[in-house]
Image (spheres, grey):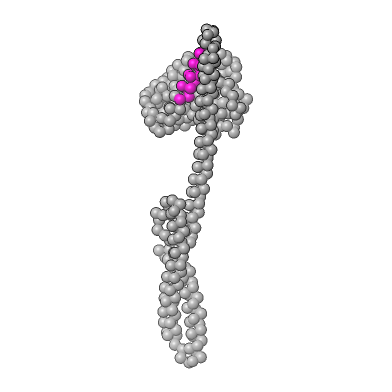
């Protein structure tokens, strides 16, 4: 309490003491020369003067500062500064300075966040339009060609209709994946938790993608033989989707006659970590922080060598985070990449 008193009234006390000191000194000299000097009169005069000066100075100075500080608070309240508007107005300059600094930092962070979001929004809209435009124009081109007379040729008609069908299929993939991401983000997609053997699930995904891997002569394998089952508690269908997306990516960007290897390791008592490692082309470090963004391209040329919606890794991240787990990526150009994620281990 004493420190608060000193901090609030320091200026008034110091000023009053200076006034009392010099006034008492002059009064003492004056009374001494008049030969009516009495020390108790002088002491009483000093006390009365000190109290009077303290009250007058403190009242006027605080009123003067309060008016100006209140204007600052009012101006900041207009800018929707909730932290300042909720607290009482103080005339303590140090407290005010701290409030203003805190407010400025918060606003700076808010402005930077809005700027980043705006850039991301523009880039996202551009990516969505590009991803939708490509198959739409492809389908439109084939249909217009058929309408212009190519439909009379049975061979051309069949070929163009098959290509148009693939374009529509890709559009369906994009819309379906966007819908899933939206549901994951807003929490509408509920996870169906169950206990299952993750080793068996990985084998099923290997079987499902074996033909795709054989086209590039890529071997899908475990790091070792898993004789004992490893049980986890998660949404089996969504985890299968995560594994499929990661393995498909490793096949797409893996080297011919390469390897996609999966390992399962104990992380802590109730967690395991699953690693998907390949020896493909790898990813530059500059791309890693944004790798899980929707439609983010490592290859900025605009061409797409491989199919897909461009949302696979974003879906993987959202599914893992919906399980309240973590996903990691490590990669080096020319050597390969490793994607890993954690799951809850079942007892």
Residue drawn at point x = 40 percent, y = 56 percent: 87
One can see residue 248 in this view? no
- 313 vs 20, nearest the viewer: 313
Residue drawn at point x = 37 percent, y = 23 percent: 195
Taking the image as shown, residue 172 lies to the left or right of residue 217, namely left
Residue drawn at point x = 44 percent, y = 31 percent: 321
Coordinates of residue 82 in the picture (x, y in percent): 42, 51
Q: Main secondary structure of the magenta part?
A: helix
Indicate the quadrant containing the C terminus: top left, top right, bottom left or bottom right: top left
Q: Is residue 164 part of the magenta span, yes or no?
A: yes
Coordinates of residue 145 in the picture (x, y in percent): 54, 15
Please tell me whether residue 165 is drawn above or below residue 10 in the rendered image: above
Image label count? 0
- Residue farthest toward the front in the current orientation of the protein: 148
Taking the image as shown, residue 137 lies to the left or right of residue 324, namely right
One can see residue 18 in this view? yes
- Residue farthest toward the right in the current orientation of the protein: 334
Quadrant for residue 256, please give it.
top right
Coordinates of residue 334 in the picture (x, y in percent): 63, 25
Q: Is residue 143 part of the magenta span, yes or no?
A: no
Coordinates of residue 214 in the picture (x, y in percent): 55, 13
Please tell me whether residue 253 is drawn above or below residue 146 in the rendered image: below
Please tell me whether residue 233 is drawn above or below residue 13 in the rendered image: above
Q: Which residues are magenta?
A: 160-175
Residue drawn at point x = 59 percent, y = 26 percent: 302
Indicate the quadrant containing the N terminus: top left, top right, bottom left or bottom right: bottom left
């Amino acid at each position: 309490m004493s420190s608060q008193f000193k901090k609030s009234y320091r200026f008034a006390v110091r000023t009053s003491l200076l006034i009392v000191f010099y006034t008492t000194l002059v009064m003492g000299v004056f009374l001494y020369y008049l030969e009516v000097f009495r020390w108790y009169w002088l002491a009483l005069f000093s006390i009365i003067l000190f109290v009077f000066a303290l009250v007058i100075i403190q009242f006027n100075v605080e009123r003067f500062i309060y008016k100006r500080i209140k204007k600052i608070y009012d101006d900041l309240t207009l800018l929707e500064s909730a932290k300042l508007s909720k607290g009482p107005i103080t005339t303590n300059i140090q407290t005010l300075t701290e409030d203003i600094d805190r407010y400025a930092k918060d606003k700076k962070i808010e402005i930077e966040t809005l700027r980043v979001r705006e850039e991301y929004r523009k880039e996202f809209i551009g990516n969505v339009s590009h991803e939708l435009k490509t198959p739409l124009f492809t389908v439109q081109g084939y249909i217009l060609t058929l309408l212009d007379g190519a439909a009379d040729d049975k061979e051309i008609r069949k070929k163009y209709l098959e290509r148009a069908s693939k374009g529509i299929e890709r559009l369906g993939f994009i819309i379906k994946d966007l819908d899933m991401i939206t549901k994951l983000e807003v929490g509408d997609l509920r996870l169906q938790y169950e206990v299952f053997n993750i080793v068996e699930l990985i084998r099923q995904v290997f079987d499902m993608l074996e033909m795709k891997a054989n086209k590039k002569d890529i071997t899908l394998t475990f790091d070792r033989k898993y004789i004992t089952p490893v049980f986890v508690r998660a949404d089996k269908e969504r985890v299968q989707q995560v594994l499929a997306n990661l393995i498909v990516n490793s096949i797409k960007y893996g080297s011919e006659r390469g390897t996609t290897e999966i390992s399962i390791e104990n992380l802590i008592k109730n967690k395991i970590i699953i690693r998907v490692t390949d020896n493909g082309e790898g990813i530059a470090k500059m791309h890693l922080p944004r790798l899980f963004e929707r439609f983010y391209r490592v290859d900025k040329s605009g061409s797409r060598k491989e199919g897909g919606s461009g949302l696979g890794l974003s879906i993987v991240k959202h599914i893992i985070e919906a399980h309240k787990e973590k996903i990691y990526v490590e990669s080096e150009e020319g050597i390969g990449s490793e994607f890993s994620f954690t799951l809850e281990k079942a007892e």
